[in-house]
Image: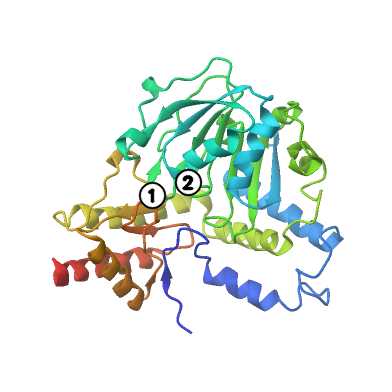
C-alpha cells in the first residue's frame, strides 16, 4: 500500500500512526472483547476514553478550568445555529465580522433568531483582506461578536485577533485550532468541527466560558441547549463514539509531537514553502490574499486559465498529490496544510509546481 500526500480541506488527512492504531484496535479494544464502537457510551470504559480526551484537549489547547468543553455530533455549521439560540435573546443584536464563505454561512444560520449586525464585511474586496478594525461597526449592546478565525475557502486567517472589549468573542476555529498557541481566555466561545485538525468528520468541539452558560438564550429543545450537554458531560444523547475516540487518539498524537508550539513552527515552514513557490513563479501561480492575513492552513492559488487549473489537478493526482482542486465557490487550486500533513508533502507539492511550470510556462 502506498499512501499519497493528501491536501484535502476536509475531511482531511489523519496521521498514519493514528490510523494504524485505530485499525489495530477496531475489532477488539482494550481487552473488553468488543470494538470501541460496540460498547455503551455510558460504560465505565468509554467514559474513561471521553474523560481522557477532554483532559488531553485541555492540555493541548490550554483550556482554563472556568471553561466547559463539549463534544457534540455534527460540525461547525450546527454550532453556527446553536450559538445564537444559547447566547442571545430573541431578536437581540449580535455582531458578525464576515471575512469569507464560512462567515457568510454563520450569518445565514443566525438570522432566523437574532438581529444580525454586519460589523465588517470583506466581500466588496473579494475576500482578499480583513477589514481594518478601525472600520468595524461594533454594537454597544451586542450579545456577542462572531468571527471566523480561518476561512478555509478564501485562505484568510486572523493573525492577531482584535480586542472587542467586554462583549464575548465567539470564534469558529474549525480549520486552525491546535495549529498554534492561543489565549483561550480572550474568547467567550470557541467551536470547531473536528475534521480538519482534530480528527474525523462527525464531531465538533465547543469550548464555552462557564458564566455564559447562565444566559437564558432562546426557547429551544433540550438537545439544542449547551447547558444540558455540559451538565451531562456531552452524554445527553448517544454521541458519535468512534469519532470521539479517534479525536482522543489525535490529541495524544499532537501532544507527543510537541503540542501546539511544535505545530506552529511546522505550519509556518510548510506554508512558507508554498507561498514562496507562488510568489517566486513570476506570475505563473497567483495568490490574491493580502500577505498579512494569508492562511497557514489553506492556500488557494490560480493559474492563467481554468483549463490549466484542471490539468494541474489531474497531473498532481497522478503524482500522488491528492485533493488540490479549489472549492467551487472560487475555483483554482487549494492546498490545505493541516497538522497531519507532513513537511514532506509541502516539499513534494513545491517540486511538482516547479516541474509543472517548466513544462507549461
Residue at horizontal 41%, vertical 66%?
323
- Disc ID at residue 305: none
**Horizontal side of residue 207 vs 265, given as left or right:** right
Which quadrant of the rendered structure holds the C terminus?
bottom left
- Disc ID at residue 296: 1
Residue at horizontal 29%, vertical 67%?
310
User: Residue 127 is drawn in which quadrant?
Assistant: top left
Estimate the x, y position of residue 116 in percent, counting from the top left.
Answer: 54, 27
- Disc ID at residue 180: 2
Do labels 2 and 1 touch, CB within 8 Å? yes
**Horizontal side of residue 352 vs 32, given as left or right:** left
**What kind of element bears circle 1?**
loop
**Horizontal side of residue 254 vs 97, given as left or right:** right
Task: Looking at the picture, tell me which residue is in the foreground, 14 or 78.
Answer: 78
Residue 46, relative to residue 182: is it above or below? below
Estimate the x, y position of residue 179 in percent, counting from the top left.
Answer: 48, 50
Residue 214, relative to residue 294: is it above or below? above
User: Residue 21 is drawn in which quadrant?
Assistant: bottom right
Task: Looking at the picture, tell me which residue is in the foreground, 115 or 103.
Answer: 115
Q: How is the image coloured?
A: rainbow
Tell me, yes or no, if residue 111 can be seen here: yes
Question: Alpha-carbon neighbours of circle 1 within 10 Å: few (<14), some, or many (≥20)?
Answer: many
Question: Alpha-carbon neighbours of circle 2 within 10 Å: few (<14), some, or many (≥20)?
Answer: some
What is the spatial separation of the Cα atoms under label 2 and label 1, in whole angstroms? 10 Å
Name of the residue lying farthest toward the top: 140
User: Residue 121 is drawn in which quadrant?
Assistant: top left
Task: Looking at the picture, tell me which residue is in the foreground, 318 or 65.
Answer: 318
Residue at horizontal 39%, vertical 24%?
133
Estimate the x, y position of residue 31 in percent, counting from the top left.
Answer: 81, 75
Q: Nearer the viewer, mark 2 or mark 1?
A: 1
Tell me, yes or no, if residue 62 can be seen here: no
Indicate which disc, 2 or 1, sits on the residue closer to the N terminus: 2
Amino acid at each position: 500500500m502506498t499512501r499519497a500526500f493528501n491536501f484535502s480541506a476536509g475531511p482531511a488527512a489523519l496521521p498514519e500512526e493514528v490510523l494504524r492504531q485505530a485499525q489495530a484496535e477496531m475489532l477488539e479494544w482494550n481487552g473488553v472483547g468488543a470494538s470501541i464502537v460496540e460498547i455503551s457510551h455510558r460504560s465505565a470504559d468509554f467514559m474513561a476514553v471521553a474523560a481522557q480526551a477532554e483532559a488531553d484537549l485541555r492540555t493541548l489547547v490550554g483550556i482554563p478550568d472556568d471553561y466547559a468543553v463539549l463534544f457534540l455530533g455534527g460540525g461547525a455549521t450546527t454550532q453556527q445555529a446553536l450559538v445564537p439560540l444559547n447566547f442571545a435573546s430573541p431578536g437581540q443584536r449580535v455582531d458578525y465580522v464576515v471575512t469569507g464563505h464560512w462567515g457568510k454561512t454563520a450569518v445565514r444560520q443566525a438570522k432566523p433568531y437574532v438581529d444580525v449586525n454586519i460589523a465588517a464585511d470583506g466581500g466588496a474586496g473579494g475576500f482578499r483582506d480583513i477589514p481594518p478594525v478601525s472600520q468595524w461597526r461594533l454594537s454597544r449592546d451586542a450579545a456577542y461578536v462572531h468571527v471566523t478565525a480561518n476561512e478555509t475557502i478564501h485562505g484568510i486567517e486572523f493573525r492577531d485577533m482584535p480586542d472587542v472589549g467586554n462583549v464575548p468573542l465567539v470564534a469558529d476555529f474549525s480549520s486552525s485550532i491546535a495549529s498554534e498557541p492561543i489565549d483561550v481566555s480572550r474568547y467567550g466561545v470557541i467551536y470547531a468541527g473536528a475534521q480538519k485538525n482534530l480528527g474525523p468528520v462527525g464531531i465538533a468541539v465547543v469550548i464555552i466560558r462557564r458564566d455564559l452558560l447562565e444566559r437564558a438564550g432562546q426557547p429551544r429543545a433540550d438537545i439544542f441547549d449547551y447547558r444540558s450537554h455540559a451538565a451531562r458531560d456531552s452524554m445527553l444523547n448517544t454521541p458519535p463514539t468512534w469519532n470521539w475516540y479517534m479525536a482522543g487518539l489525535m490529541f495524544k498524537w499532537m501532544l507527543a509531537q510537541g503540542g501546539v508550539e511544535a505545530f506552529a513552527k511546522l505550519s509556518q515552514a510548510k506554508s512558507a514553502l508554498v507561498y514562496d513557490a507562488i510568489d517566486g513563479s513570476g506570475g505563473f501561480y497567483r495568490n490574491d490574499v493580502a500577505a498579512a492575513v494569508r492562511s497557514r492552513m489553506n492556500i488557494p492559488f490560480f493559474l492563467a486559465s481554468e483549463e490549466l487549473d484542471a490539468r494541474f489537478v489531474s497531473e498532481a493526482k497522478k503524482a500522488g498529490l491528492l485533493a488540490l482542486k479549489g472549492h467551487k465557490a472560487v475555483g483554482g487550486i487549494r492546498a490545505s496544510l493541516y497538522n497531519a500533513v507532513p513537511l514532506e508533502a509541502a516539499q513534494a507539492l513545491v517540486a511538482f509546481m516547479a516541474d509543472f511550470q517548466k513544462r507549461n510556462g
